[in-house]
Image (cartoon, helix red, strand yellow):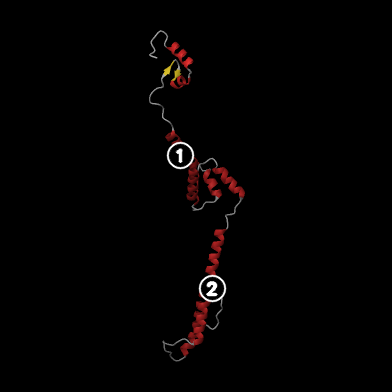
């Protein structure tokens, strides 16, 4: 079938060579007397096909090993980038909490249709009006939830002094306040 086989031939090339060989040999076969369909390949043909198969398998193994090495090499290398880009990203996210930074990154993923947005895309997303409004609304919500409610009962005033101010007074000052506040009346003290 195939007389010439290259060691580096791809599977497609081997198939193409076989087809070409068959096309060339067909006119000759038409002139020959009828052959039986159960013809066994000759030892030479068998060795040629077996050699092509082994060469193809070796090439596949080599390419798979190279691909695995390349993936391992890429995974081992730290991400190198422009240090100024990291500084710009840090400045853009400096005023935001970690939760807000997650919101910005999630928005950048959707906006740029990228599961791993670049620092430049994250910076652009942090300046987006929608993100700013969303973060401000979240901050206002947290602020209103954490706000201490005003006391339900009014603060008691005695002589224009609150109960906290009265507690801080010494005994002499307290006696003076009591005399001034309750002149002529009963204080119950």
Q: Position of residue 25 (x, y in %)?
A: 50, 85
Q: Residues within 10 Å of mark 1 (few under 14, many from 20)?
A: few
Q: Is residue 143 above or below residue 52?
A: above
Q: Nearer the viewer, residue 161 or 58?
A: 161
Quarter of the view holding residue 94: top right
Q: Position of residue 164 (x, y in %)?
A: 45, 22
The disc, 1 or 2, on the residue closer to the chain's N-terminal end is 2
Identify the residue position indicated by label 2 in the image: 59
Q: Judging from the image, what secondary structure is the residue with disc 1 in?
A: helix
Q: Residue at x 53, y 77 (%)?
A: 55
Q: Position of residue 63 (x, y in %)?
A: 54, 69
Q: Residue at x 53, y 74 (%)?
A: 58
Quarter of the view holding residue 74: bottom right
Q: Nearer the viewer, residue 183 or 153?
A: 183
Q: How many marks?
A: 2
Q: Nearer the viewer, residue 133 or 185?
A: 185
* Distance Cα–Cα, label 1 vs label 2: 58 Å
Identify the residue position indicated by label 1 in the image: 138
Q: Judging from the image, what secondary structure is the residue with disc 2 in?
A: helix
Q: Residue at x 59, y 46 (%)?
A: 87
Q: Is residue 131 visible?
A: yes
- Horizontal side of 91 relative to 182 (left or right) equals right
Q: Position of residue 37 (x, y in %)?
A: 41, 87
Q: Residues within 10 Å of mark 2 (few under 14, many from 20)?
A: some
């Amino acid at each position: 079938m195939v007389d010439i086989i290259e060691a580096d031939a791809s599977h497609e090339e081997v198939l193409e060579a076989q087809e070409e060989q068959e096309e060339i040999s067909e006119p000759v076969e038409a002139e020959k007397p009828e052959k039986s369909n159960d013809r066994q390949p000759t030892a030479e043909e068998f060795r040629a096909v077996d050699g092509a198969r082994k060469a193809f398998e070796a090439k596949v193994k080599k390419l798979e090993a190279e691909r695995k090495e390349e993936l391992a090499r890429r995974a081992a290398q730290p991400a190198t980038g422009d240090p100024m880009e990291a500084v710009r990203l840090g400045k853009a996210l400096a005023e935001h909490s970690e939760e807000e930074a997650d919101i910005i990154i999630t928005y950048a993923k959707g906006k740029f249709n990228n599961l791993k947005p670049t620092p430049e895309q994250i910076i652009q997303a942090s300046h987006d009006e929608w993100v700013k409004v969303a973060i401000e609304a979240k901050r206002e919500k947290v602020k209103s939830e954490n706000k201490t409610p005003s006391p339900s009962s009014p603060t008691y005033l005695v002589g224009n002094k609150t109960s906290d101010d009265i507690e801080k007074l010494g005994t002499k000052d307290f006696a003076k306040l009591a005399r001034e506040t309750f002149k002529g009346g009963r204080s119950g003290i």
